[in-house]
């Protein structure tokens, strides 16, 4: 059974060269989250999908919290309009803070940082440390290569077939919130994390 959703973390890119279709999808997600009165946690950046997410949420009167290592603020990557900005020592602490008090994780298209955060979260869920929904926005097949890799890992016994249920894939931003609400908490015992 799923639990009430009060806060979500959104993993997304800070690249200023992000294609328009991903920016538009970010707007849809931001509007849905504000309408549902859900607090959003993100990486704190001012550009790319990060900046668009914060801009849209703030423009609509929503709640958003940034988590950023001190060194990133020092090089002026921080979104200056986000009042709730938590500075941490390093990237490891940042990822840990992303999960604290978060009822779901959403991965929008992104680069290596987004991918690293996503795969670590899936691993933590497999091990029983994060039971909440993890949603991938596979807009126009962006995550298809990753999903094919996961499928090959399963076929070649590096992952169990049940591990494909660690995350939920949607193809439209409007489907993200419904996917969160219908995804049950992960309740597999730690022994189930092994490939059998």
Image: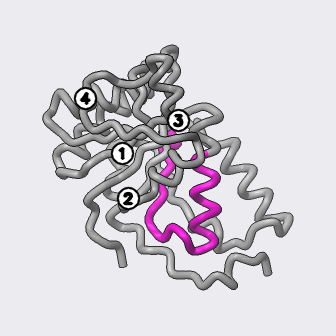
Q: Secondary structure under badge 1?
A: strand
Q: Is residue 120 magenta?
A: yes
Crowdedness near tag 3: few (<14), some (14–19) or many (≥20) residues, C-alpha within 10 Å:
many
Disc 1 to disc 4, how far (Cα)? 14 Å
Q: Residue at x 31, y 45 (%)?
A: 40
- The percent position of residue 115, horizontal first and vertical second, equals 62, 42
The residue wearing badge 1 is 41
Q: Secondary structure under badge 4?
A: helix
Counting residues from the N terminus, which is met first, the one under dot 4 or under dot 3?
4
Disc 2 to disc 3, how far (Cα)? 20 Å
Q: Quadrant of the N terminus?
A: bottom left
Counting residues from the N terminus, which is met first, the one under dot 1 or under dot 2?
1
Quadrant assignment, res 125:
bottom right
Looking at the image, is mark 2 or mark 4 nearer the viewer?
A: 2
Q: Residue at x 48, y 21 (%)?
A: 74
- The percent position of residue 54, horizontal first and vertical second, equals 30, 30
Quick check: marks 1 and 3 in contact, CB under 8 Å?
no
Quadrant assignment, res 162:
bottom right
Q: Residue at x 75, y 67 (%)?
A: 159
- Depth check, front residue: 83 or 4: 83
Disc 2 to disc 4, how far (Cα)? 20 Å
Q: Which mark is residue 56?
A: 4
Q: Which mark is residue 102?
A: 2
- Depth check, front residue: 3 or 20: 3
């Amino acid at each position: 059974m799923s639990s009430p959703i009060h806060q979500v973390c959104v993993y997304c890119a800070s690249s200023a060269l992000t294609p328009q279709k991903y920016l538009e999808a970010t707007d849809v997600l931001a509007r849905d989250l504000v309408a549902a009165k859900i607090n959003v946690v993100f990486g704190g950046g001012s550009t790319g999908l990060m900046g668009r997410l914060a801009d849209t949420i703030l423009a609509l009167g929503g709640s958003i919290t940034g988590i950023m290592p001190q060194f990133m603020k020092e090089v002026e990557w921080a979104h200056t309009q986000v009042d709730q900005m938590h500075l941490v020592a390093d990237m490891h602490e940042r990822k840990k803070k992303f999960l604290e008090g978060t009822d779901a994780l959403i991965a929008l298209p992104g680069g290596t940082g987004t991918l690293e955060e996503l795969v670590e979260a899936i691993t933590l869920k497999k091990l029983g440390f994060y039971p909440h929904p993890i949603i991938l926005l596979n807009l126009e097949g962006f995550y298809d290569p990753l999903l094919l890799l996961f499928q090959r890992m399963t076929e070649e016994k590096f992952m169990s077939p049940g591990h494909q249920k660690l995350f939920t894939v949607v193809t439209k931003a409007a489907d993200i919130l419904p996917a969160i609400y219908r995804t049950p908490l992960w309740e597999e015992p730690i022994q189930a994390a092994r490939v059998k």
